[in-house]
Every structure is written in structure tokens, then in C-alpha cells.
Amino acid sequence: MHFTAAIIGRPNVGKSTLFNRLVGQRLALVDDLPGVTRDRREGEARLSDLVFRVIDTAGLDDVQDDSLEARMRQQTEQAVADADVVLFVIDARAGITPLDKHFAAWLRRGKTPVVVVANKAEGRGGAGGIYEAFELGLGDPVAISAEHGEGLADLFAALMPYGEAPSSEPVDEVDDAEVPDEEPAAHKIQLAIVGRPNVGKSTLINRLLGEDRMLTGPEAGITRDAIGVDWQWRDHSFRIIDTAGMRKKPKVEGKLEKLSVGDTLRTIRFAEVVVLVLDGEQPLERQDLTIGRMVEDEGRALVIALSKWDLVADKQGTLKRLADRLSISLPQVQGITCVPVSGKTGQGLDRLMEAVIATHAVWNRRIPTPQLNRWLTAVQEHNPPPLVDGKRLRLRYMTQANIRPPTFALFASKPGDLPDSYRRYLVNLMRGDFDLPGVPIRMMLRKGKNPYADDKR
């Protein structure tokens, strides 16, 4: 039986390191600076043959006001409420602190079972902290080193009872032939939400999910990790990834922000569709164009969401200025769908998801080779390639080499002599004639093989 374990504890005790160790990947950002994690992150953990869902949380602080720290604590409290067992992590080398005791008392009052994990227990430096952990009144501590992978067998033994499914009914023997084949898992569209800081990315995702899943607030740069959530919209499955806001490169300061930006770039690289969120009151600044070009360089499908639309006064003028600027500054992905949305009111969210589905379909579109070559012949008759050394370049053949994004191979007599302007002309013509808006189009030039080259007669 699968179960859910929430990793909690005060800041900088190694929660994210333990999360990464359990899921077997470096998903969560890790740094010596306390308070790196803010949103709760989920993943599938594996210890030997024990498979379970694990939730990484922000460091616990004893605050109850409207501050960012208080909102982070609310996220952690929700994770504890959703969990079947809590992994309460302490720093064995630092020993038990008053904050550890405070939250241990809070956990004792709750109904969720708790396993005390004494992290950083490698060597002899953590022996004192392990003994002190008995004072918390939460049972025997499990000594581990998440960084070095020590003590995981003891953690497996402590979690094993939560992975056993108790059953009082006898299990009937079933012939294998009677067991129907399992349905293949539906493909989840990888949807990344990107943009500058404080444009409303997390608020937009919360409105889509229908819950306060992502930490939000007036402070810029709240999101640090790229946080993924599985979600179903109508008949489509999504993996939505919230990302840290990306500032201009000269303004990126400190190791932590560089890690956050690197995490966002990796998210774009592995996404299928990217929603670029713009501030409706300040649309398409230079940094927005930079992010858009990054998405195009990675070959991802792109949709633009104009956020905070409920605050925009001149709506028609804003849309016109945006369309004009896009046609000039981002011609590589002409025909991008721009959807006005509001995370506060929910306006435009269905239209946004319809645009995402449509753009994803275009990104996966394949055009038959005969249709491409009929089109290529017609294009050359209407506007032939330029002359090179007094001779006309011949475009012999065209085929689609790949999808995601649409990629075409064009065979020419002298591919190196075909001007970039004519290649761009072909790409732009294809976009309109084959209905390929909002996605990058790749065109590779190849030299056609001479059938008489090997003839020795």
C-alpha cells in the first residue's frame, strides 16, 4: 500500500537533502543558507521495495501573523494534515533546540504518527544529539546521514509498518488469465509556467488547481524551487510546474538566486508547453522577450498569458500594442496565442487551457511528405530561389524529419548557398500554409545525393 510521508523540521536541518535522497534525484534546491525551501514539494520515494509519496516542506518557524514565514508554516501544516506519517528531522550535531521541543509538543497533540529522524549523524559528532532526541517524547530516534546515505536501513524499518496493508478478509485466488490488462497511464503534458518575478505565476496556478497549493504574496521572488503538481483538466492530464521568476542576468545576485534560475531553465528544457506570464499592466518588457527567446531556442511550444487583466484599464490598446511588439521582436514564433487572464477572478483560464491544448497539438503535428513536396514545387514556381554564380539553386525534396517541434529536412543542389532570407521566407510561408502558429519551426538544409556519382562508365 502506498502512503504519504511529510518531512518537517526547523530550518537547515537537512530536509531537502533527505527528500532528494529518498526520491533518488536532486529535485529540491539545497544550500547552507537557512530557509531555502518555501513551497511544499512532492515526489515518489523508494527505500528498497518500499514505495511511498514524500513531501518536502519549508523550515518551521513559531510565527502566527500574516508574514511570509507564517504562510510557509501554513503550507507545512497542510502537508502534515495530508500525511500518513511525519518524518520530524532534527540536526544531531546541533542537538535539541527550544524550537525542536516546541514543535515536538505540537506534533504530540496531533493525530499523525511521527518518526524522529536525527540527521547529520555520521561519525561521532551526532551522538549527543541522538541521545537528546529521546527527550522529545516521540519514540526512538532514527540516526541517519542524508548527505552520505547512512542509516537508511533503519529508516526503512521505521517506515515499513506504514507500507503494510492490513486486511482481515481472505484473498481469493484468481487465475492470471482472468486478470484484465492494465490500461496504459495517460500521458501528462509537461506544462511550465514562467515569467518575471511577481507577475502572478503562483496565483494563476492556485486558481487553476482550485486550492492554495503554491505560496503567494506581495513579496517578489517568493517561489524558489520549480514545483510540479499533477492536475486533470477535462480529458487531459497535466504536470504543471511553477518556477522562480527570472530577472535580467546582471541583476541575478547570490548563489541561491542563480540556483533558482538554473532550475527554471531546466524546467523549460524538459517542458512540452510553456506559458509565459506577462504583467498586464506592464506587458512585454525586455526580460519577457529574453525568456520568450529562451523558450524558442529550446524548441518548446509557447502560449502567452496576460496576467492581472482585471487591473488593466485600456484593454484593447494593450492587446494591440502587444501584438505589434510580438510581430517585431519575436518573429521566430509568429502566431503566438495571447490570452488575457486573472488569477484573482478566474477570468480567461478555460481559454488559456484550450490554447495550451491547441498549441501542444500543433507542436506534435506531422505533415505528409507528398503534401510538402507539392507545396515546395508551387512555392518555387511562384518565387524561385535566387541565382548563384548565374545558376538557379534547385530545391529538390522536402520531408518532415521530426516533431516536437516540427523539424523539416530540405534537400538542395547547393544548400550552403541558400540565403537565410529565403529560408526564413519558406518557414514563414509554411507557418501560414500548414497552420503552425506559436511553435518553433526547424529547417535543416541537406545536399541531395547525385544518383550518377558512383557510375564508373
Image: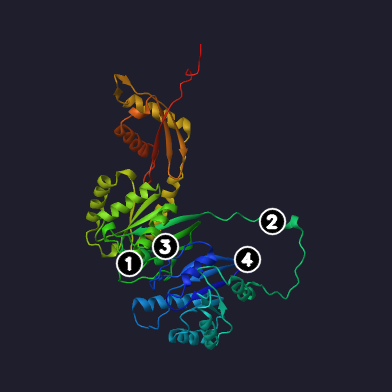
Check the image and report above or below for 340 versus 105: above
How packed is label 3: few (under 14 Cα within 10 Å), some, or many (20 or more)? many
Look at mark 3 in the image and give the residue it sits on: 226
The reply to whether discs 4 and 2 touch (Cβ–Cβ < 8 Å) is no
Disc 2 residue type?
Pro
Element on which disc 4 rests: loop
How packed is label 4: few (under 14 Cα within 10 Å), some, or many (20 or more)? few
Query: Sequence-wise, which precedes: disc 2 or disc 1?
Result: 2
Element on which disc 1 rests: loop
Element on which disc 2 rests: loop
Q: What residue lies at 71% left-to-right and 57% top-to-bottom? A: 179
**Residue 262, how many percent across, how many down?**
38, 58
Query: Sequence-wise, which precedes: disc 4 or disc 2?
Result: 4
Q: Which mark is residue 48?
A: 4
Disc 3 residue type?
Ala
Element on which disc 3 rests: loop
Is 129 situated left or right of 12 in this image? right
The reply to whether discs 3 and 2 touch (Cβ–Cβ < 8 Å) is no
Q: Nearer the viewer, mark 3 or mark 2?
A: 3
**Disc 4/disc 2 C-alpha distance (Å):** 28 Å
Q: Nearer the viewer, mark 2 or mark 1?
A: 1
Among all residues in the image, which is located at the extreme top?
457
How packed is label 2: few (under 14 Cα within 10 Å), some, or many (20 or more)? few
**Residue 400, how many percent across, how many down?**
46, 36
Query: Sequence-wise, which precedes: disc 3 or disc 4?
Result: 4
Q: Which mark is residue 221?
A: 1
Toward the viewer: 96 or 335? 96
Locate residue 243: give its quadrant. bottom left
Toward the viewer: 155 or 373? 155
Disc 1 residue type?
Gly
Q: Nearer the viewer, mark 1 or mark 4?
A: 4
Toward the viewer: 361 or 69? 69
